Amino acid sequence: MTIESVLAALKDVPDPTGGDIVAKGRVQAPRLKDGIAGIVLDVTGLSADTRASLERSIRAAVVAVPGVNDIRIAMTADKVERRIIAIGSGKGGVGKSTLSANLAVALARLGHKVGLVDADIYGPSQPRLMGSEKRPETADKQIIPVEAYGVRLLSLGQLVEAGAALAWRGPMAATALGQLIEGDWGDAEILIADLPPGTGDIQLSLIQKWKPAGAVIVSTPQDLALIDATRAIDLFRKMGVPVIGLVENMAGYQCPHCGELSDPFGIGGAEAAAKVMSIPFLGRVPLTLNIRRSSDSGQPPAAGDDEEAGYFRSIAVKLLEQIKAAS
């Protein structure tokens, strides 16, 4: 048993990202003593399942080296700097979940590693919006997100029967939120947390235990929605979470026949409110038939290359600027 013979065996173990684990620098020089091969393995960016599979492959390769009686593997990983961005609203029906899904997809298309947490415990809608109702697996007591459109997704909607009512009190809902937030997100840099409407237990649990790096508030243009949005803004500010953006959703209706925009909910209200409250205005998204159809069919408009995708991409770019400014 020599270091060279052990390294030669490790070169036959493929790396999950291509090549072999030695060439990718995942393995430090093995330590050999009394027939025991000690290996330090860098597992940065690998899911729990991938780490377990890689460990099995290493053991199978090294045990075949003459003189090796036992193998000890220590796994290390660089700590990922992960920011949670809370997407909130003062009331329901303003398109917060649709914005959360498309914002996550737009960020992923801009080259970022993104996770999407459906924190709306009582009304999870992200599996439908993202077209991914596959049940996630678990490993090492962590839930492994399911990937869709380049985004890692966890939602209670993937874990319970469709349409089932969740009659849970606050502590149970907070426990469920914790299992989602603390899932195996791998090397995800940004977690988009789609919060339920209002200012209740879920918002307080997220803020107190996992302290988001920032919050984005979604509102429609009319005064009633803006009044409720102000309450959400007040909550985040009082809890020390910077409000890094306001988005005006359903900002005009685009006729599918002539393309003309009308303003059944008014226009510019959210932008004006953002200016008054000294909050960055990230942009507006009109109400279009294509956004509605795509969302209902589990095909986020942000995954395309048309005008609707451009709305979400623009908001994502401005959000990244605010995240950088706040860090």
Image: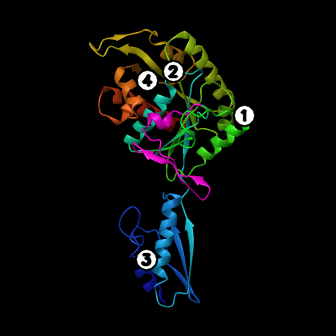
Q: Nearer the viewer, mark 4 or mark 2?
A: 2
Q: Is residue 242 above or below residue 83?
A: above
Who comes first in sequence, dot 4 or dot 2? Answer: 2
Residue shown at 50%/77% (left/top)? 59
Alpha-carbon distance for marks 4 and 1? 36 Å
Secondary element at image label 1: loop
Q: Is residue 247 left or right of residue 252?
A: right
Q: Nearer the viewer, mark 2 or mark 1?
A: 1
Q: Which residue carries the number 2 mark?
A: 94
Q: Which residue carries the number 1 mark?
A: 169
Magenta range:
123-150
The disc placed on residue 283 is 4
Q: Is residue 73 above or below residue 278?
A: below
Q: What scheme was used to colour the molecule?
A: rainbow
Q: Which residue carries the number 3 mark?
A: 10
* Residue projecting furthest to the left: 258
Alpha-carbon distance for marks 2 and 3? 54 Å
Alpha-carbon distance for marks 4 and 2? 15 Å
Q: Amino acid at mark 4?
A: Gly
Alpha-carbon distance for marks 2 and 1? 25 Å
Depth order, front residue of 123/305: 123
Q: Amino acid at mark 2?
A: Val
Who comes first in sequence, dot 1 or dot 3? Answer: 3
